[in-house]
Image: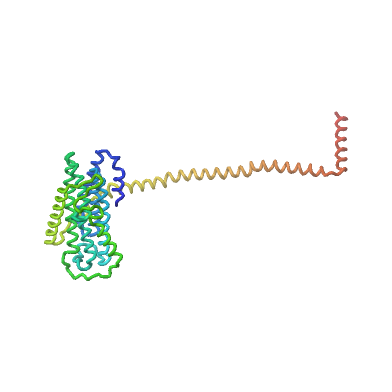
Amino acid sequence: VAAGVYLLLRVHFLFTPITLNIVALVGISTAIIGSVSAIAQYDIKKILAYSTISQLGIMITAIGLQGTNAALLHLTAHAFFKAGLFLCVGIITYLFHEQDLRKISGLRNAEVTTFICFLICIASLSGVPFTSGFVSKDLILSAAFEMTSEGRFAGLIFILLLITSILTCIYSVRMTWYLFLKPADQETGSKNNLPWTMKASVLLLALGSGWFIISKNPFHYAGDKMEVSWILSLVSAFVIMLSILGSYFYYKSRALSHSPRFLLEGFYIDRLYKSLVVAPIKKISRLSEWADLTFIDKIIHGFAYAQATFAHLSSWTDRNLVDGMVHGFAYSAKGVGAIVRSIQNGKIQIALVGSLFAIIIFLFFILFN
């Protein structure tokens, strides 16, 4: 999840201004799409998954606006509160074997520890004051606000970031209300058999969602050339609290509404991705496999068989002809040596016979020549 943001943080200095604008545009588009999709989901895991996509989009947007320190700060804060939220959802799934908002509600009294930790983490996600999410989001908003003087594009990004913050509050309140605060349709039994390891994990992450892990001042961050104006912090806090209150009274007065199909499907981005990217890649893969098995493998096998045949032929030639000639000379020398060795045995009789035989040949040569 964090790899893409971290990579951009490491290489952002290589990007041109135009490239950074593209990065910011992709980031804010991702943030808006993720947050709107999260509002429509019923599966609590999907809500948090789309929320993560949205928060990553906010970080990418900050990088595009050259607010790299703000993006890194939000990445750090996000690691705590989003991990805490996912573990809280995991606890709910573990205890109640359900993760559909339409089927579970009123869990506030069923699991008090989980409810408190969830409330702290979701507040940090929404950017409520006295949380790490409030400080890091304000820093991103400040980076965007400082860029507004450079053109309308940065001003549009700033407005869209505010809208994303409002949307974050909406799906956060929606999830909290229907999951914990809405009166249950039927009595939900208390689940006090939760292992202490689960409780300790979410308690630590909820504690890490406080402002003090990234800033001494809960309303104001200043350091390493980053500074947030007090006015912007107050405006941000007002907008966040107003969004939370408005969302609360909106969802309190109505049942869980039916979500449009295109929102449940995340604007059909996954379908488009499968149709435009995955399906062509699969076809190309199948075609490549066919070409590999039909042509490339046969050519390679042909070369391999030819090389093996040539190797066997070379081995036979070496063994039967080259080695045969060498062995023939060796055996001939060995035979001649054996004959000469048998004659040179040191006996005077053999020497006399040899001398006589040589004299006879010499006389025969003189007489008949």
x and y, in percent, of residue 74 in the image: 25, 51
Quarter holding residue 179: bottom left
User: How did the renderer colour the structure?
Assistant: rainbow
Q: Residue furthest top?
A: 369
Q: Extreme front residue here?
A: 216
The quarter holding residue 183 reads: bottom left
- Residue at 60 percent of width and 44 percent of height: 316
Q: Is residue 321 left or right of residue 252?
A: right
**Residue under the image location 85 percent in, 39 percent down:** 354
Question: In the image shown, does 347 or 90 lie closer to the viewer?
Answer: 90
User: How many badges with numbers are in the image?
Assistant: 0
Q: Residue at x 31, y 45 (%)?
A: 10
In the figure, is residue 156 to the left or right of 318? left
Percent of width and height locating residue 49: 25, 55
Q: Is residue 262 visible?
A: no
Q: Nearer the viewer, residue 217 or 63?
A: 217
Q: Is residue 177 visible?
A: yes
Q: Position of residue 195 (x, y in %)?
A: 30, 67
In the rendered image, the vertical position of residue 244 relative to residue 223, given as above or below: below
Specify whether 137 is left or right of 363. Answer: left
Horizontal and vertical percent for residue 317? 61, 42
Relative to 222, is 187 above or below? below
Q: Quadrant of the C terminus?
A: top right
